[in-house]
Image (spheres, rainbow, N blue to C red):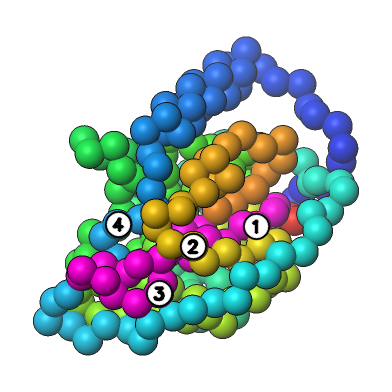
Amino acid sequence: MSTPTDYEPAETPAARRRHTTRIAASAALLATLGVGLIACGQGGKGDPAPDVKVHNAATTQAKQAVAPLKASKPTGLRIPSAGVDARSMLDLSVGADQELQVPPADKADEPGWWTGGVTPGEKGPAVIVAHYDTANGPALMRNVAKIKVGDTIEVPRADGSTATFKVREIQQVDKKDFPTNKVYGATGRPELRLLTCGGPIVGGHRSDNIILFADLVS
């Protein structure tokens, strides 16, 4: 379990190399990725979830951060307020079209982690993607509208630990206005970005992205 701190622990040479590699990967993504999640809410045989609109809300970030955790791959996702209890986690990367991949429609109840970023709990913005709905109907984040500022997001990890985050900000934006730097830009503390889709279906896809910004609390 992490404890409150406002100091930075010394990095080993190997950790420093990994950190440098991730900074480079983030910079590359920021240079190419200018929109949000595309493949959400495609028209298909399944009934889509209702159009969703959340109220943008935020609270002040705590002055002190908890100490970051060591690198360990995420293995699931729990959000009690939204009834989310996923027991697995897909690996996502940037595709040939320079867009961040999303979980396939036949795995709509599994979240995915952007492998180009930090693991949840490490210093920096870890990014997780989960569908609101797909061509097959409602998906893992079908209850995203129930999530409020202050709610917890738990990410079990391969080392047996759980990174627990508290939602600090909820933002719904048109995909054309996706805040790339705010989502993927470097941070000085362990944070989480959980991305899903919302809004009406326009041209076969959800028009908006819903973004949860959360801080590590334990």
Q: For marks 4 and 1, give the one nearer the viewer.
A: 4
Among the two numbered marks 2 and 1 on one chain, the one whose residue lies closer to the N terminus: 2
Quarter of the C terminus within the rendering: bottom right
Distance Cα–Cα, label 4 vs label 3: 13 Å
* Residue at the spot of label 3: 199
Q: Position of residue 48 (x, y in %)?
A: 27, 82
Q: Are marks 4 and 2 in contact (CB under 8 Å)?
A: no
* Residue at the spot of label 2: 173
* Residue at the spot of label 4: 38
Dot 3 falls on a residue whose secondary structure is strand
Q: Position of residue 180 (x, y in %)?
A: 49, 44
Q: Quadrant of residue 164?
A: bottom right
Dot 4 falls on a residue whose secondary structure is loop
Q: Is residue 22 magenta?
A: no
Please name the amino acid that badge 1 sits on. Ala
Distance Cα–Cα, label 3 vs label 1: 22 Å
Distance Cα–Cα, label 3 vs label 2: 9 Å
Among the two numbered marks 4 and 2 on one chain, the one whose residue lies closer to the N terminus: 4
Dot 2 falls on a residue whose secondary structure is strand
Please provide the residue range marked out in magenta: 194-216
Residue 72 in the figure: left or right of residue 101? right
